[in-house]
Amino acid sequence: MLARVIQSGTLTTPVTTWPSAGVTNGNTGGAAQTLPAYADVQRIRYTATDVYINANGFASYTMGPWFNNNGGLFGFWPLARDYQIRITRNPSPAATKTRHPGGMIGMMVNGVAIYDLGDAFSFKQTANSPSVTGTDQMGANGDGWWSRDALAVEVVTFDPGFAHQPGNNGQYHYHAEPKALRYQLGDNMKATYNASTNTYTYTEDLTNLHHSPILGWAYDGYPIYGPYGYSSAMNAGSPIGRMRSGFVLRNGTNGTQNLNTTGRVTLAKWAAAVFGVANPGNTNPVVLAATQYGPSTSYQTTGPNGTTTYTLGRYCGDYDFLGDLGQIQGVAFDLDTYNGRNCVTPEFPGGTYAYFVSIDAAGNTVFPHMLGKQYYGTPNAGNATTVPGTAVQLFNGGPNSQEAMDAPAVNKSTGDVTLTWSSVEGGTYKVEASNSLTGTWTTLNAAKPADANATETTTTENGAALTSRKRFYRVTRTGLSSYDP
């Protein structure tokens, strides 16, 4: 089916094309989506070692709207991406862990990009004595020690499906649990419809709790599950439970330092390893040089978008890992610093390493949300410029889908015969009927359009069962509307 967005709180009718966002707060919103594009994964091929996935990067649920901190329209729009991604079928743990680069580090099963917990910003000092001052800066302009948690500052720009896109390339992506995708996959979610905005709110449904499905794959080849797994990692007969994050705020509880009191003058052991701070004494926390200090949790700056307070939870370094505080995985928490564990799952009864998304008991995302700051395995997947000629095609969808017809449904009282077939949205179909396979075919509809926003199309021949003892039908796709290739 075609991808759709809702453009704003007032433009609530889903559309398959949308304009350029123009300029918001000095940021260029990017190009327009001038042609419809097909949603979800378009093609899957595989070899003995790899899986190759083609997708446009659009979800099949209705995306948008996106708003900013002040309730105004977020200035960026998603754009079709034309992905060709390779995922290894033979992942292996990495002896030396690799920090995630910026941008895409995996793909969801709906073809949408996965980012890690951070955004592109870190704190940049302007002074460190007698107090730390500065602002968050993008990329290499930041100091790098106090890397921002994307959810702390960007969650207001997420749509109801819990995703958004940057302004430079329109790459729709997730940093945390994909709420709408979880609902589509039956991952213990329920949806409440709001007729005034034509959107859904997604919440946890624990009435028939079951193991989460695979939501996506990281570029090290390991699967990413929803938040529920077996309570005993290697026992498929154990009760289903929510996978508990191993991270806690450094607020003085759980044996942590209280950064509200001490200031950001140390990093937790895990964060120091990730962000390149030497720890020769293997201590937790790690004392920083003054040039590496972060802002106090009460520090404020005023800029073009108003006043910013650098509260606890804004940065990755504001969290400590319970394993570094003497707590035991599987007892006090379930997931390691990469946000996964070695376990059995329905798809891997013999065991695998697997990532899980993190939520709390109320269903709110918690740090590190979906993936930590490093791969558990060796990252050897990503963009694939070519696909081996020996690759076997497993699935071909979108405009290349092969239609199939259900058995005709007959209303015995009226004689109406209803035909239903899998269809390509944007397609046009010729519907024919005959009383004999070798006889003359009669055209019932020369140009039946595929039903909009659907994967199936129906049409009815009235009274046919009352006048014909035998009736045969055939449907042929005769045309396809222009689309973004």
Image (cartoon, grey):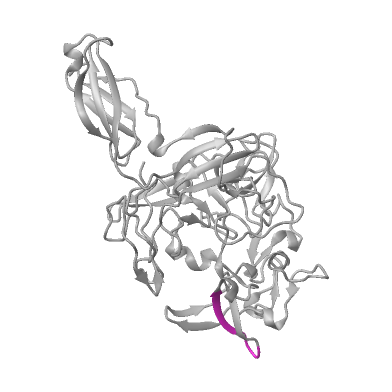
Q: Position of residue 15 (x, y in %)?
A: 30, 51
Q: In the picture provided, is 266 more to the left or to the right than 5?
A: right
Q: Position of residue 449 (x, y in %)?
A: 25, 35
In terms of depth relative to the viewer, which is nearer, 170 or 388? 388
Quarter location, residue 444:
top left
**x 72%, y 77%: residue:** 288
Where 434 sits versus 68, above or below?
Answer: above
Quarter location, residue 167:
bottom left
Q: Position of residue 34 (x, y in %)?
A: 32, 54
Q: In the picture provided, is 249 more to the left or to the right than 22?
A: right
Q: In the picture provided, is 214 more to the left or to the right than 195?
A: right
**x 37%, y 29%: residue:** 403
Where 65 sits versus 59, above or below?
Answer: below
**x 46%, y 49%: residue:** 82
In terms of depth relative to the viewer, which is nearer, 165 or 131? 165
User: Seen from this angle, which residue lies furthest bottom?
Assistant: 130
Q: Is residue 155 rendered magenta in the image?
A: no
Residue extent of the magenta highlight: 129-137
**x 51%, y 57%: residue:** 364
| Number of dots carrying numbers | 0
Quarter of the N terminus within the rendering: top left
Confirm whether residue 461 shows in the render.
yes
Q: Position of residue 380 (x, y in %)?
A: 66, 49
Confirm whether residue 188 shows in the render.
no
In terms of depth relative to the viewer, which is nearer, 55 or 386? 386
Where 425 sits versus 402, above or below?
Answer: below
